[in-house]
Image (cartoon, helix red, strand yellow):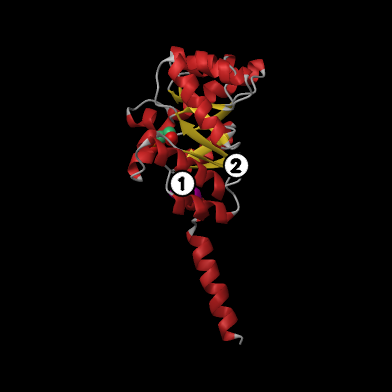
Amino acid sequence: MKFFIDTANLEQIKEAQALGILDGVTTNPSLMAKEGITGQDNILKHYVDICSVVTGDVSAEVISTDYEGIVQEGETLAALHPQIVVKVPVIQDGIKAIRYFSDKGIKTNCTLVFSAGQALLAAKAGATYVSPFIGRLDDISADGLNLIDEIRLIYDNYDFKTQILAASVRHTMHVLECAKIGADVMTGPMSSIVGLLKHPLTDSGLAQFLADHKKGN
Ligand code: G3P
């Protein structure tokens, strides 16, 4: 399972990269705004900065919602750096644009996916990644993990190569359940990654080992 971090915060990205387990980064317009990155030039520069501190794929989202606009914006983003993956919403013009990018060898992440039908069309269009938002489904009392399960079944039935990128991951149990189902990638906050390390028996065991070592020296 690949681990992506879902943030535009450069310090957190560096911290995750330093752990040695990071496979990529996802961003979206809200995450960019949260970091105070505004204006086209600053936004493009920030994507390049992110690419320079990680080794894996970096998703950069288009703002346009019409086919021509998405294609133009996506080509600009893809030309920034070989690690850039163009993130496109799962709307009609978005699917059309994903097919265009796929035919041109430009990697895509089909985003805002909330149903298996949307994921099926994204795969048909040749998306590199599909991003089902599991946390946002859970927020409205739907079952985000069930969606991952459905997409896994459909993709396996037809051997689709599109990678399931479990997005809107909120906590460690999302990560673990996605791993059990077989999501290819998860993207979440740093807390959902380092939280996997937490165990009281590890803490008490380590404290005991250190105390015993001290007694013997
Ligand atoms: O980047 C897309 C997705 O991961 C958003 O997550 O927490 O805003 O629902 P969230």
Q: Is residue 155 above or below residue 2?
A: above
Residue 110 visible at all? no
- Please state which amino acid type lies under the numbered disc 2: Gly
Characterize the magenta stretch by its predominant secondary structure.
helix
Q: Is 159 or 10 nearer to us in this picture?
A: 10
The residue singled out by tag 2 in the image is: 56
Query: Could you say which disc has been placed on residue 192 in the image?
Result: 1
Q: Is residue 76 left or right of residue 138?
A: right
Q: Is residue 107 magenta?
A: no
Image coordinates for residue 133, horizontal then vertical, percent? 43, 29
The N terminus, quarter of image: top right
Would you call the spot at circle 2 few (<14 residues within 10 Å), some (14-19), or many (20 or more)? some
Q: Separation of disc 2 and disc 1 at Cα?
A: 19 Å
- Please state which amino acid type lies under the numbered disc 1: Ser
Would you call the spot at circle 1 few (<14 residues within 10 Å), some (14-19), or many (20 or more)? many
Q: Is 198 or 32 nearer to us in this picture?
A: 32
User: Within the displayed image, which quadrant is ligand 1 positioned in?
Assistant: top left
